[in-house]
Image (cartoon, helix red, strand yellow):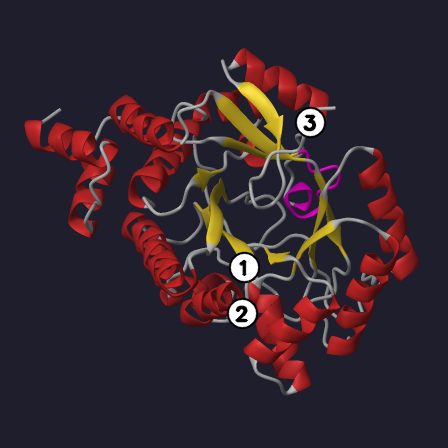
Amino acid sequence: MSQSIQQILDEAAQGRRLTLDEAQLLQREAGLHDLGHAAHRVRLRKHPEPVVTYVVDRNINYSNVCVCACRFCAYFRAPGHAEGFVLSFEEIGQKIAETIALGGTQILMQGGHHPDLPLSWYEDMLRYIKANYRIHVHAFSPPEIMHFAKISGLTTAQVIQRLKASGLDSIPGGGAEILVDRVRSQVSPNKCPAGQWLAVMEEAHSQGLRTTATMMFGHEETQDERLEHLFAVRESQDRSLQKVGGGYTAFIPWTFQPDNTAIDARPLTSPEYLRMLALSRLVLDNVDNVQVSWVTMGPKIAQLALYFGGNDFGSTMIEENVVRAAGVCFRLSQQEIDVLVRAAGFEPRQRRMDYSLVEKS
């Protein structure tokens, strides 16, 4: 390894902000273990305690009906399809009750862009949940917010305000894919462009809602476009921190799963995933938490990823449908996550969306 690369890694590990040119150099030439070591040093500087967190929650897809027809999605059904569904509020409530019984503190709710459900349906759903269950609602990705604005004739700020008033607690980072419009026009042409995704998140931050950011990589983007995505998130977090003091709680990179989709891509290898995870930790100096992806990579690689910059094991995902539709099915209970985290050398702790710890029972 050249002295310049080692110097860049050392300085990044100590807290100096990487430039795009430096990140590109590391991406091309740094060794895998050197990247991982530097990323782990950053992780230990931000989180010196030997703790790995996770959340107990459930992914509830309230509908699979969608007009987007994203080429990477194996889960959606077009309007009128025999397999399309919309859950009743009672069905949603049953899933929430099961989640709470298993120690869950939140639900993640996302659905397709349903052409016939008005904004009031989503408001009523939130009110029903909050009236009947004590649960954190982490719901509606930026493309969904944009869809609600379109069908209601309201601004995104008004939509967020109304959803928050109805019970929305935070917004997930879904629909980001790659935050580069060239890529989005190919893989998800009917979703909002990158600038609108970022604007929705920053509006949510300004209204007091915390959010997460994700990246689905390994489909039709270039190496440089992955870095463009990271720098877009970093700049967005800078803006939110400057304005309101809070923004993205975590960054969650995960690999595209090609089975049953309209994209013919080679599945990424574990080293490719680990390199991107480490680069994410090094570039995103203003995002405190980086989540590993056992859902797409499996539990063993997720353990290893805790030494490549990751400090959070994600979610128990009591229910998960979208990745499963693409042919990948790993399942872990809370007890299994505890065992895996301890075996990796850390103390497992259940958390909430804002990364406050749940008291031990």
Residue drawn at (80%, 62%) of the image = 84
Identify the residue at horizontal 57%, vertical 67% (top origin).
143
User: Where residue 29 appears, x then y in whole percent?
Assistant: 18, 33
Disc 1 to disc 2, C-alpha distance? 8 Å
Would you identify the image quadrant in which residue 270 lies?
Answer: top left
The image quarter in which residue 35 lies: top left
Give the residue pinned by disc 1: 175
Separation of marks 1 and 3 at Cα, in angstroms: 24 Å
Residue at the spot of label 2: 191
**Picture coordinates of residue 142, whole percent (x, y):** 55, 65
Q: Is residue 353 left or right of residue 114?
A: left
Question: Can residue 83 be spotted in the picture?
Answer: no
In terms of sequence position, does the residue under pointer 1 or pointer 2 come before the other?
1
Q: Is residue 116 above or below residue 288?
A: below
**Residue at which label 3 appears:** 332
Marks 1 and 2 in Cβ contact (< 8 Å): yes
Screen quadrant of the N terminus: top left
Q: Looking at this view, is 116 or 309 the one in front?
A: 309
Q: Is residue 153 magenta?
A: no
Please tell me which residue is depicted at 48% across the width and 66% down the height of the picture. 197
The stretch in magenta equals: 316-325
- As drawn, which residue projects farthest toward the right? 90
